[in-house]
C-alpha cells in the first residue's frame, strides 16, 4: 500500500490565564471584528526557520508587549479533523492561503497577573479577558485546548503549589488565595482546612499591613517569598 503524504502545517496556540480576585479569566482575541462572539486563542503558524518556542513568544509579545513572559509547552494537538469545519477552512484560506491538509498546533500555557498593562501590537486589534464560565464556542478545538490546559495547571500545582502565586498581586489576602484555589479547582474548599494548608507553606509570609478603606474587618496582607520557596526546594 502506497503511503499518502499530506500538506501539514504547524502552529502555536497560547492559553493565558489571569485571576481578577473573583474568578479565572482567559486571554482571547477576536477573529472577526464584526462578530463580537468570534473569539479564539491567540496563535499563529510558525515562520520559516522559526522555532516553536520562539513563535509562541512572538505571539504573546505582539499581544501583550511583554518580552519575557513565562511560557510552558504542554501538549500537541494533531487530530485530522481539528480544522475541518467550513468556517475554519474559510478563515485559514483568507489568512494564510496555503493548501493546508492538516494543521498541527503546539499549545503553550502562561499564568499572568491580570492587572499587568498589556500593549497589543498584533494583527488582532481586539483582545479581552474572558471569564472561564463565559468562554464561548471557539473555532478549531480551542475549547478542548482550554479544558486540557486547566487540567494541566492543576497537575503543576500538585507538583509545585507555589505556581499559583504567578496569578496573584505582590501582596494578597488569604481570602484572595482561597478564591483562587476554588476557581482553579472549580469547587468549594473549606476555609478552615485551607488556613491549615496555608500555615504549612513557609513561603507565604505575613506583612505588617492590612486592607484599608474596606467595609468589613480589614484582612492582613501576605506575600510570596521566592527565596524561602527556593530554599525549601533545595532542602528537598
Image (spheres, helix red, strand yellow):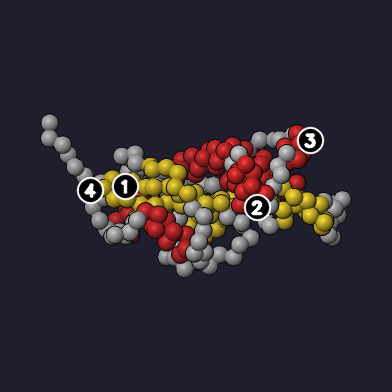
73 vs 18, left or right, is left
**Residue in the picture at 78% in, 51% down:** 206
Residue, disc 1? 103
Q: Position of residue 150 (x, y in %)?
A: 54, 41
- Mark 1: secondary structure: strand
196 vs 87, left or right, is right
Give the Cα separation between the discs numbered 4 and 2.
49 Å
205 vs 60, left or right, is right
Viewer-nearest of labels 4 and 3? Answer: 3
Residue 15 visible in rendering = no
Give the Cα separation between the discs numbered 1 and 2.
43 Å
**Residue in the picture at 75% in, 34% down:** 193
Quadrant where the C terminus is found in the figure: top right
Please name whichever residue, 137 or 55, is drawn nearer the observer in this view of the structure: 55
Viewer-nearest of labels 1 and 2? Answer: 2
Going from N to C along the chain, the mark reached first, 4 or 1, is 4
Residue, disc 4? 7
Residue, disc 3? 192
Please name whichever residue, 205 or 128, is drawn nearer the observer in this view of the structure: 205
Going from N to C along the chain, the mark reached first, 3 or 2, is 3
Residue located farthest toward the top when viewing the structure as drawn:
1
Amino acid at each position: 500500500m502506497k503511503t499518502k503524504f499530506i500538506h501539514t502545517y504547524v502552529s502555536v496556540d497560547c492559553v493565558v490565564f489571569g485571576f481578577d480576585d473573583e474568578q479565572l479569566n482567559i486571554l482571547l482575541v477576536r477573529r472577526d471584528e464584526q462578530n463580537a462572539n468570534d473569539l479564539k486563542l491567540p496563535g499563529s503558524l510558525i515562520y520559516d526557520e522559526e522555532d516553536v518556542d520562539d513563535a509562541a513568544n512572538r505571539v504573546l509579545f505582539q499581544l501583550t508587549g511583554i518580552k519575557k513572559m513565562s511560557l510552558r509547552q504542554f501538549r500537541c494537538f494533531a487530530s485530522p479533523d481539528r480544522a475541518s469545519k467550513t468556517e475554519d477552512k474559510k478563515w485559514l484560506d483568507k489568512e494564510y492561503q496555503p493548501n493546508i491538509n492538516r494543521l498541527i498546533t503546539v499549545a503553550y500555557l502562561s499564568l499572568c497577573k491580570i492587572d499587568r498593562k498589556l500593549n497589543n501590537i498584533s494583527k488582532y486589534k481586539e483582545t479581552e479577558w474572558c471569564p472561564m464560565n463565559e468562554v464561548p464556542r471557539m473555532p478549531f478545538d480551542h475549547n478542548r485546548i482550554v479544558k486540557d490546559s486547566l487540567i494541566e495547571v492543576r497537575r503543576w500545582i500538585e507538583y509545585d503549589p507555589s505556581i499559583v502565586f504567578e496569578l496573584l498581586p505582590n501582596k494578597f489576602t488569604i481570602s484572595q488565595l482561597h478564591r483562587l484555589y476554588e476557581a482553579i479547582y472549580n469547587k468549594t474548599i473549606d476555609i478552615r482546612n485551607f488556613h491549615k494548608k496555608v500555615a504549612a507553606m513557609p513561603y507565604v509570609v505575613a506583612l505588617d499591613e492590612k486592607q484599608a478603606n474596606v467595609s468589613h474587618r480589614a484582612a492582613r496582607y501576605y506575600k510570596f517569598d521566592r527565596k524561602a520557596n527556593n530554599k525549601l526546594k533545595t532542602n528537598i
